[in-house]
Structures are given as structure tokens and as C-alpha cells.
Image: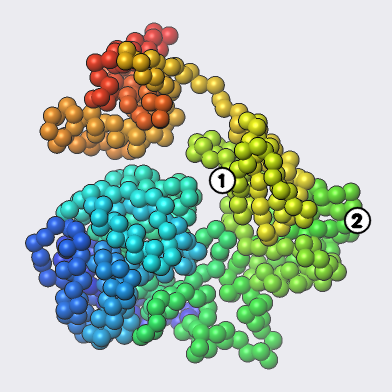
Amino acid sequence: MGDRELPEAGIGVVVPYDFAQDREMWRWVPAPTSLHVTRTPYVATPADAGQALLISAPETVRQAVRDVLLPEPGVVAYSCTSGSFVAGADGERALREVIRDAGAPQAVTTAGALVAACAALGVDRLALATPYVDDLTAKLEAFLAAHGIGTVARYGLGLLGRIWDVRAEEVVRAVRAADHPDAEAVFVSCTNLPTYDVIAGLEAELGKPVLTANQVTMWAALGAVGRCAVGPGQSLVECRAPGDRAVLRVVHDSTADLTVVPSGFGTDDGTGGPDGGPGTDPGSGHATEDEVADGLPALYKVRVRLPDESGALARLTAAVAEVDGNILALSVHGNDSRSVVDEMLVGGRVSAARLSRVIRRRLRSAGLDAVQVVVADPHELVDPPTRALDLLTRTRTAGDVARGLAELLHADAVETTPDGTGPETGDGHALVLPCPDGAGLIARRAWAPFTVTERARAEAFLRAASTQPARDGHELLLPGGEELTVLPAAGAETTELDTLLRTCLAGASGDGTAVADWTVDELRSVLDPPGGVCLLVRTTGGTLVAAGSLLAADGGGPEPVVLVHPLYRGRGLAAWLRRRLGTTVAA
């Protein structure tokens, strides 16, 4: 609305009786917006599917909605994940009907908001981190599957009560444990978990959106009343996703499901038409929908095949200047003896379609592959050598060469071929790359053919990824004949160490009641002790069964501290670790 003051907006919120995250929910809410919160009646039952059915019963929800209608909210949100997915996709739709029938002008549920958030970010493969027991998590998977969203991994805390006691550090560990290379995003279920302060950091660490129950609920409810949620660094709030930089908002009506549309269309600032179309006057001389990228700065990757002659680059830069674009990066790819491919990152308030048209007109190019303009990721602003080194580090850590290569080449897919051969199409949209181990990879990309320069980059990347740094490793043969591998810790094995610590303490207590209560920083200090070393012992299948670390003792030098899985005790493993660590101290 420009400089005009926004009017007051109200959101009615129905939460379960045990909800304890009121303060966090408010953090997504901008001024001037109010939340009018009411709780469902108390029921004495564990936090399982039965509880979810009770707190989402039609009469319970109908009465709660009526309780928040007096302040005349613009939308009523049912803020409970399990209560809105426990009866499946049909149950969630029926729940919204109950809310509207009770008098709410618009209806939002947490589970429905999750589906809308996935649509906004282009996500159809999720990893799930939940506090639930397995059968309740399975119902969430079924709900998502009914909306075409697959679950590729899940991690549950198995709690039946007092979920609000889970700390933010435990949420972080759960998200890390749930994440999977095939997941396009991670969803943290349950509105009773604290998540606001960990979302941005986890997204930076994992390189993908992290969605949470309270976040998607507030995002959808605020969108229904024409407001944007507050959440710096959160992909959903800023609507950042791979290949999509458009800013989105959610539109609701009294009958339809959630709909995601570009912001600036049908807004309340007087520029949008009543039907949600662009509000520009065709005769006013202003840009139309096709000319402006939603009125917001956009970032594009532009690839242009140019003749290898003087003046060609000048014509290209003149085309970008004509649409008030800003060239933020430029690189030249070898193509053939008569042409090169110039790749630019261009920022501006122009649409991809218009930018492509102007470049083609200036260069007098009509070929299908002569000009390609696609939405770029801001991470591409990092110079290519630095980006390649970062991808190499992440590839070695994750052990996923194909994924790293796909990111390096901006490929649509990278497939493996056992014999190192494959059908390399003549149009340049498929690239066959041999690996040092004799296998091969085929990269495919529809939006632009691969260049000679990209082939050279990919081959160098694969050579570097296959060269593993020397590590001080050992092979152990236990008395029973089992083989183990001992290697120094990399420093990132906090989840595995946490599991081993819990197992060891539970075994020591005899009844399984002891609980390890170490923070992530404490676990990291064991894995990477100052001035010392940490050795990790694994089975041939990769399971961590023992760890030894040199930790500083009170008033003295470092001393060996050893953890051994109960199943591997009494076999000389602890003594071997202490001797090995003692040798390190002596050295």
C-alpha cells in the first residue's frame, strides 16, 4: 500500500488444549495484526491418533471457532498438525468446512497450509521430523501422499506427551537425522515444537527449505488477510526455492482450496483488478504483466551463443541495458571454432520473456538454443572457482558425486552407467562423463546444451571428487573374527555420537532410564577436541560402535575418554583405543 498505513487485521486461531507456543506463534505476525487464540477443551489422553481425533471433532472445533468470532477476524486457523491430518485429505477438507459453517469468513488448517507451502516452493518430496509415535507419523505420510507429496525419510521422537518440553537443540538434531539427499525440503510437524529460531540456520546448513507447523499456519493465515509473515532467512516466508524467485501469497475464498498466486496480482493497494489480474492500463504506457517480473528485482542466468567476432559482446550488453538490467557476472564458454557461449547473471525488474526478446532482436538471433534465459539462484553470484570448491567439499562429506555434479552443471538429472557409456545426444543436451573407477555418469539438461568448458569443469570435478585424502586409519580384527574400521572423526558426526552415548548410558543404568543430555557443542568438542584427536570405530556396515577422544582433564593434560557399545564390550576394544590415544599423547 505504499506509504499508507495498513489497517488492523485479525486472525482467529484454534489450538489444542495443551498448546504452549503462543509466544513463538506471534513472532511470525507483523504489525498491525492481532491473533485471537482459543483452546479446545481438556481431555486426559496420550498425544496419539486418538487425541488428534478428539481435538478435531466437528462439535469441538465449531464451538472453538464461535469463541473467536466476536473480534471479527478475517480468517480462522485450526493450528494443530495431527488434528488436521489424522482423518486424511477428506477429513482436512471437512474440517475447513466446519470452520466456515461456524461463521469464519475463511478457513486454514496446519496440514492444508503445509500442502500450500509445498506448492509455493515447488516441493513434492519431503523428509519428516516429528515428535510422534510411528503410527501417527504414518498417517501424516498418507495425508501427504493423497496430495501428491512423497515422504523420502522420517525421524520420530516417539513422544506421547509433554511435547512442549522438547528443546530447540533436540529439534535441530531431529531435522538433521530426518534429512535425506532426495528430500527437497524438511517438515517439522507439531505446533507444540519450538522452531522459529532454528529454521534459518538449518536451511543454510542443509541447503533446502525447512518448513514447520507454526510457520506454515501463520504464513497461510496471514496470506489470507493480505499480510506477509515475518521470518528472516526462511525460504517459505521469503518464497525462495530452486528455480523460483517469485514472491508468492496465499489467496482463499469461501469454497476453494488454498491457491498460490504471484504477489502484486489482486492486491489491496489499488493497482490490482478484482479478478486477481494485473491492474495496469494497457493504454497508460506502463509495463504489462509480461514486461515486469512481479514488480520485484529478479535474477536471471542468461546464455547466449555469439559469433566469435568483435562487437558481438557489445550488442549483448546493449540489449541488457535497454531493459535496465544489471550484469552481475560474466563468463565465456568455449563452443566451436566459429562461436562462443557467453553466460551472464542479470538482475533487474524485467521478465525473462522480455529480456530474451530484446536480446534476440539486438543480436538478430532466432535459433532455439541461441538465447536462453532462466531464473537463477542467488548462490550463483559466488565466483565459479569458489562455488566449485564448495560443491567439492559438500560432495566429499555427503558421498554423493552425482548430486554435486548436477549442482555444478545445473543439470536436470545425473544418472549412473555401470560400464561408463551411454547415449550422448547430438544436440548437446546430454553429457557422458567417465569416472576413474570405470563407471560413468550421464548428465541431462533441457534448458541449454552443455558446452566444451562445462565438460572440462565436470571432468576436473570428478577427478577431484574421486581423490580421497589420506587418513590415519586402522583395520581391527576382534577375537570373534569381526572386522572393524577406525578413522579420525571428521567433526560432523554429532547425531551418531549422541546415539552411541545414549545407548551406553542406558546400558549402564540397567533399566534404560538414563538419558544423555549433551548439547551439540559438547558433542562437537568430543569429536574435535582442542589439541587432541577423536577416533571412531565402525562396523563394515558403517555403524558407529565405539569412540575414543583425548579430552582435557582438570588440572592436567589430555586424557583418553572411551565409549564402547554394550554389545562390543569385553573384547579388548576399549583397551586398544586407550593405548592408541595414549600413543598420540606421548607423540
CB atoms of marks 1 and 2 within 8 Å: no
Kind of residue indicated by mark 2: Ser
Side (left or right) of 159 relative to 323: left
Side (left or right) of 499 relative to 66: right
Give the label, 1 or 2, closer to the camera: 1
Percent of width and height locating residue 476: 40, 15
Q: Secondary structure at mark 1?
A: helix
Percent of width and height locating residue 233: 45, 57
Q: Residue furthest front?
A: 419
Q: Secondary structure at mark 2?
A: loop
Q: How many numbered markers are drawn?
A: 2
Please report whichever mark, 1 or 2, sits nearer to the chain's N-terminal start: 2
Which residue is the site of mark 2? 310
Q: Residue at x 73, y 43 (%)?
A: 455
Q: Residue at x 67, y 77 (%)?
A: 291
Q: Residue at x 39, y 50 (%)?
A: 153
Q: Nearer the viewer, residue 290 or 132?
A: 132
Side (left or right) of 226 relative to 389: left
Which residue is the site of mark 1? 403
Name above or below for residue 424 compared with residue 538.
below
The colour mode here is rainbow
Kind of residue indicated by mark 1: Arg
